[in-house]
Image (cartoon, rainbow, N blue to C red):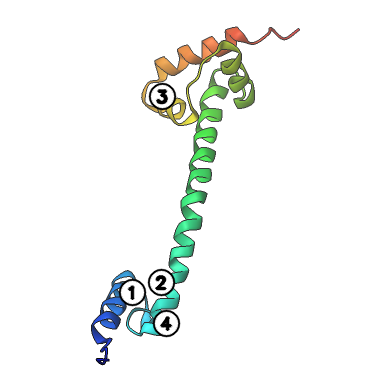
Amino acid sequence: MARVKRGVTSHAKHKKVFKAAKGFYGRRKNTIRTAKAAVDRSMQYATRDRKAKKRVFRALWIQRLNAAVREAGLTYSRFIDGLNKAGVEIDRKVLSELAIAEPAAFAAIVEKAKAALPKAA
C-alpha cells in the first residue's frame, strides 16, 4: 500500500479556517487551534443572530407604527385590530415604510382602520 501524504488536504482545510478568521484579533487569526475555535463560535453567533435580527426589525416596525398612529389618535393595538376587522392584509414592514415615505397613503389606511372599529360609548 502506498503512503498517503496529507499535507495538501490539511493545508486546504487550514486555509479555509484562516480565511473565515480574517480580521480576528491576536492569535485567533493565525494559529489553527484558536482560529478554529473562534470560527466555530462565530458561526454559532451568526446563526443565532440571523434569528434575532428578525425579532429586532419587527419590534422597530411596531415602534414606528405606534408613533405614527398615535398622531392620528389611535394606539398600535387598536390600529391593528381595526386593520383586521377591515380586512386589510398589509404586513408591519410595509405599513412602517408607508408611514415614513407616504404619509397621505398611510393616513388613508388609518382612516379605514378607524372606520372598522366600534365607536366608543
**Dot 2 or dot 4, earlier in sequence:** 4
Residue at left offset 35%, top offset 85% = 31
From mark 2 to mark 4, how far is it between C-alphas? Answer: 9 Å
The answer to whether 19 appears left or right of 25 in the picture is: left
Which quadrant would residue 118 be assigned to in this image?
top right
Instruction: Kindly identify the amino acid type of the residue bearing the numbered disc 1.
Output: Val
Q: Which residue lies furthest to the front in this view?
A: 1
What amino acid type is highlighted by mark number 2? Val
Mark 3, other Cα within 10 Å: few <14 / some 14–19 / many ≥20: some
Disc 3 designates what residue? Answer: 98
Using the numbered discs, state the Cα–Cα distance from disc 1 to disc 2 in whole angstroms.
7 Å
* Residue on which the image places disc 2: 39
Of residues 6 and 78, the one nearer the viewer is: 6
Instruction: Say if mark 1 contacts mark 2, CB within 8 Å.
Output: yes
Q: Residue at x 55, y 13 (%)?
A: 87
Mark in front: 2 vs 3: 2
Local secondary structure at mark 3? helix
**Are the residues tagged 3 and 4 within 8 Å (C-beta)?**
no
| Helix, strand or loop status at disc 4 | helix
Q: Specify the farthest residue to the right.
A: 121
According to the picture, the residue beneath numbered tag 1 turns out to be 17
State which tag comes first along the sequence, 1 or 4.
1
Q: State the residue at coordinates (42%, 82%).
A: 34
| Eye-nearest disc, 3 or 4 | 4
